[in-house]
Amino acid sequence: MTRKAAPIFYEGNKILRISDLPFSQSTLFSGWVQPGNFVVLGERNDFDCVKYEDYEYWYQNYFITERDLDEMI
């Protein structure tokens, strides 16, 4: 089972770099996250970081739920 990623702390905020996720999560999560959810770090327009709470929501409500359903089938 793939574990939940740990947050990165940036200027007092918890963020997540999508490229740091395991492949199974990064492909699914990057397809789920909306363009407006990306976090701009400084002056860089990175499109690889999101708020950790967005990832937590997706992990609990989509990733874990789908894995549980796959095991039941």
Image (tube, rainbow, N blue to C red):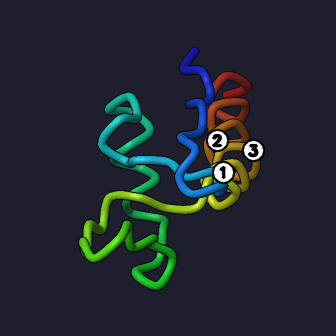
Question: Which residue is at a point 32% across and 32% down the rendered structure image?
Answer: 23
- Residue 71, percent across and down? 67, 22
Question: Which residue is at a point 73% across and 41% down the rendered structure image?
Answer: 65
Q: How many marks?
A: 3
State which mark lies toward you, 1 or 3: 3
Quadrant where the image shows the C terminus: top right
- Kind of residue at disc 1: Tyr
Sequence order check: which comes first, mark 2 or mark 3? 3
Q: Nearer the viewer, residue 63 or 37?
A: 37
Q: Give how far apart the Cα atoms at labels 1 and 3 are.
A: 6 Å
Q: Which residue is mark 2?
A: 66
- Kind of residue at disc 2: Glu
Q: Which residue is mark 3?
A: 60
State which mark lies toward you, 2 or 1: 1
State which mark lies toward you, 2 or 3: 3
In terms of secondary structure, where does tag 1 sit? helix
Whether 10 is drawn above or below 47: the answer is above
Question: Which residue is at a point 53% across and 40% down the rendered structure image?
Answer: 8
Q: Nearer the viewer, residue 43 or 73?
A: 43
Tags 1 and 3 touching, CB below 8 Å: yes
Q: Which residue is mark 1?
A: 62
Tags 2 and 1 touching, CB below 8 Å: yes
Q: Give how far apart the Cα atoms at labels 2 and 3 are.
A: 10 Å
- Residue 33, percent across and down? 48, 68
Q: Which mark is residue 40?
A: none
- Kind of residue at disc 3: Gln
Within 10 Å of the Cα at label 1, are there few (<14), some (14-19), or many (20+) other Cα atoms? some
Within 10 Å of the Cα at label 3, are there few (<14), some (14-19), or many (20+) other Cα atoms? few
